[in-house]
Image (spheres, helix red, strand yellow):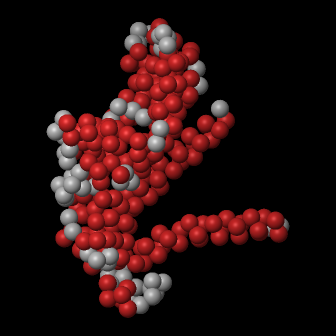
Amino acid sequence: MTSRNALIYLGLLAGALITLAPFGLGLLTSLTSAQQFATGTPLALPNPPTLANYAGLGDAGFGRALAVTALMTAMITLAQLTFSVLAAYAFARLEFTGRDALFWVYIATLMVPGTVTVVPLYLMMAETGLRNTFWALVLPFLFGSPYAIFLLREYFRGIPADLVNAARLDGANTLDAIVHVVLPASKPILVTLTLITVVSQWNSFMWPLVITSGGTWRVLTVATAGLQTQYNAQWPLVMAATTVAIVPLIALFLVFQRQIVRSIVVTGLK
């Protein structure tokens, strides 16, 4: 190994340690008793390790928040992918008046900060009586997203038109062509978009905090933030909640990492 390669690997190792250190410290803190954390140093190893903080999450109503977050994320992800696929196919393959102009106007909404729409959305939910309900959590995000539609449109345009035309000659309608031709050829990008959507919704904080109150429809991020005040900033308990929140995302990435890498490679080649 040359000295240049050694320096590169040392730099990568240093970057990995800096990136992973907070997660490791959070895990160790979650296994530390409140008494040891209060009397010791934050970098001290748990002595002995304890799962009492994880057990305490049940008493704090964390289980319901986990279920609400999972249901919200699943519904939004499924709906966003469905409507984004349909819209992206229309913008990529169907011919209609004003198609490109409509597409770019819609994509321009990416330039609008999400915080700008919080107050109008809140007023809409309040006027329709949906405030502090599950539907208030999911309705604003069900019908696709500009980022997903843009990414899928560009990917669909790269699929050979002969494949779709061949399906049409065999008697397939538009929906059949999407389901049996376009979607099977788009698995890498669909997996990537699924992960992006899951992560963004799983970590959603601002909108659930604004539109819900109490513990009925509280999500993980809001529940974790509430632990800091409800339990006088017991950081071992907070770190246990944080660890529970990120474990599903890490597992999801490990399962689908090959598809993510493949989608990056394919997109780069295009």
**Image coords of residue 157 (percent x, y):** 56, 23
Across the whole image, how many numbered discs are drawn on residues?
0
Instruction: Say whether residue 55 is visible.
Output: no
Residue drawn 36% across the image and 61% down it:
245
Q: Nearer the viewer, residue 85 or 2?
A: 85
Tell me where residue 119 sits by quadrant: top left
Residue drawn 57% across the image and 46% down it:
261
Q: Nearer the viewer, residue 11 or 38?
A: 38
**Image coords of residue 217 (percent x, y):** 21, 52
Image quadrant occupied by the C terminus: top right
In the image, taking residue 176 as reference, residue 100 lies left or right, namely right
Rendered view: 17 above or below 159: below
Q: Nearer the viewer, residue 139 or 19?
A: 139
Image quadrant occupied by the N terminus: bottom right
Rendered view: 256 above or below 58: above
Q: Residue furthest bottom?
A: 39
Rendered view: 22 above or below 164: below
Instruction: Say whether residue 127 is visible.
Output: yes
